[in-house]
Amino acid sequence: MSRIITHEKLKQIVDTLIADGKIVAGPVAAPGSRFFFRTLTKPDQLVLDPSVMPTNSVKEFFFPQHETICKYRYEGKELIVSDSEPFAADQFVFGARPCDAASLPILDKVFAWDYQDRFYQKRRENSTVITLACRQADENCFCTSVGLAPDTQAGADAMLLQIDAETFEVRTFTDKGNTLFDHQTTPSDKTGQTAAPPDVRFDSKNVEKYLTEHFNDSVFDETSMRCVSCGACTYLCPTCHCFDIVDEGGAAKGNRVKNWDTCQVSLFTLHASGHNPRANQSARQRNRIQHKFCIYPGKFGLILCTGCGNCTRDCSASLGVRPLLELLDKKSR
């Protein structure tokens, strides 16, 4: 016996959460037939359509593009530094794709590694994530190649599986999910459907082994010629987490902030001396692939990729990581 909920009932839940002052996020329609995860101001903005693939990732609600970590000011000759308080509100994210939510347990590792990032950790602690199982996959999806599936539970507190245009099956995985949907569902013998898993496009173990043994492979020179170094792949990726810490303000007062950065631009590794250990796009692309499929798995036991396909789907050169990984897998055989 499953539990089901109507679209209208979901909108009522969202409306109540917003009225209670909670932060609620979900896919929102944007010009150009695109959809973005945004903070909702009213329930009608929420798009719960399994055919919709939002352009950006829910990681923005856990690892913001711009975040103040402390403030400074001078009072006479005395420097006063005050820490910023971590995110304290309750946050609910609706309609995340399973491949997107699956990034959160992966990011947990790096934000609780040699330094405890209380800003990220507090957002995770105060958030409830409700995923929407996939009903279709496009040519850029490759979740199965990294061990995931269209109904992966990782990172989700609850999941919605579409039964028809107005009805969803509800599956809960955590106390947060149980609390949110307590007394909100009805029993049913109907169950939601998921997409057929996309074909496995490469063997990640083959890729890791090849990366370990062929550091200077010419494939990086060949494929990087198409790359325009825009960094879109890293900003749209659910698992990329590079950031810079800078002081913004003036001599008298200002903020120390954490801003997203990208390893795909030349300034990322430029030393003050002028030396750049990754001076060309070939080296930068190699580093990104090495990090995702060799370095991160070696350190944390997890691939730094969820197979969402955003990096190819929204790449101006139709590159991203998947075509390169397919090439590496083929070369390893």
Image (spheres, helix red, strand yellow):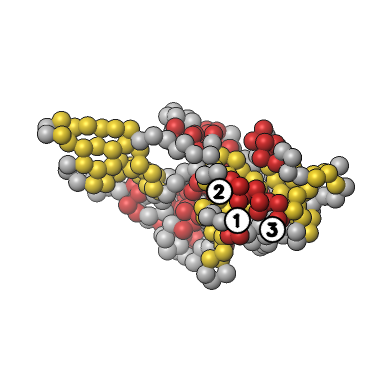
Foreground tag (3 vs 1): 1
Q: Is residue 267 above or below residue 174?
A: below
Residue identified by numbered label 3: 50
* Amino acid type of the residue tagged 2 in the rendering: Ile
**Front-lying residue, 238 or 205:** 238
Q: CB atoms at circles 2 and 3 under 8 Å apart?
A: no
Residue at (54% x, 59% y) in the render: 36
Image location (x, y in percent) of residue 286: 47, 50
Report the disc number at residue 18: 2
Image spot of residue 249 (x, y percent) = 23, 47
Q: Please tell me whether mark 2 or mark 3 is closer to you in this view.
A: 2
Where in the figure is residue 199, as x and y percent of width and height?
Answer: 72, 55
Separation of marks 2 and 3 at Cα, in angstroms: 23 Å
Name the residue beneath numbered marker 1: 43
Q: Which residue: 19% across, 46% down?
A: 250
Q: Residue at x 42, y 49 (%)?
A: 65
Q: Is residue 102 visible?
A: no
> Which element is circle 1 on?
helix
